[in-house]
Image (cartoon, rainbow, N blue to C red):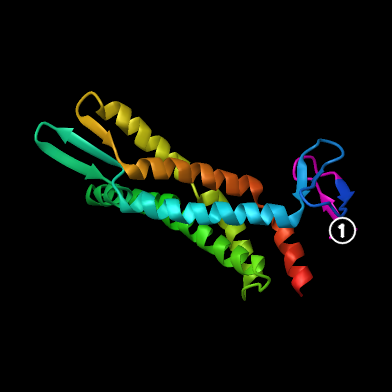
Amino acid sequence: MHGTIIACHECDLLQRAVALPPGGVARCARCGAVLYRHGATGLDQVLALTVAGLILFVLANAFPLLTMRIEANVQQASLLSGAWLLADQGMAGLALLVVLTSAVIPLLKLTLLAYILLPLRLGLPAPGTARALRAVLALQPWAMMEVFLLGVLVAMVKLSSMAEIVVGPALYAFGFLVLVLAGITSSLDPRAVWDRLEIRR
């Protein structure tokens, strides 16, 4: 990447990329925005967050989000049960959107990142790494678990006066997963992946 001309994503200033020491960060000369980081450290951090995210995703879907008790009636709510309820009420499009943005796309993003970063960390890039990275970047705006989490919290507040609400383990896993995904988004530097691929080639 040394000598490459890059544009700042904040102010569009063109500047020449330079080699960085381990842990180094290149910032825009005009606005100070982060342009890129030293590849090794950044990718290891993203890989660790990705593995944590996959574990949290399994936990978030293996247990109930909430348990509601109204007298003798006990009902558990999970991500998929909520989507099925929306579909049963004639809102199949909304149910599909909920499943895609809060489950399918985040899982696909995490799986693709693991497919990219784990072999790269071992020094053996997986076939189709470049296409997988482009897919991750395209999916990024559609992974909106935080919106679903906010909806669950609003529902908890509204239902608390009518029923006893017991928070399930999945809700904690879901909350940590939102933080992990945010960390991945802020830490992932696509240029570091491209640089590692060029070195291996």
The magenta span reads: 1-13
> Dividing the image into 4 quarters, which one contains the C terminus?
bottom right
Q: Is residue 68 above or below residue 52?
A: above
Name the residue carrying label 1.
4
Residue 73 visible to the viewer = yes
With 70 as the anchor, is 23 left or right in this view? right
Residue at left 43%, top 50%?
Answer: 56
Q: Is residue 141 above or below residue 167?
A: below
Residue at left 81%, top 35%?
Answer: 31
For label 1, count other residues whose C-alpha is less than 10 Å away and answer few (under 14), some (14-19) or many (20+).
few
* Residue found at the far top of this picture: 161
Label 1: which secondary element: loop
Q: Position of residue 127 (x, y in %)?
A: 62, 76
> Dividing the image into 4 quarters, which one contains the N terminus?
bottom right
With 101 as the anchor, is 50 left or right in this view? right
* Amino acid type, mark 1: Thr
Residue at left 57%, top 54%?
Answer: 48
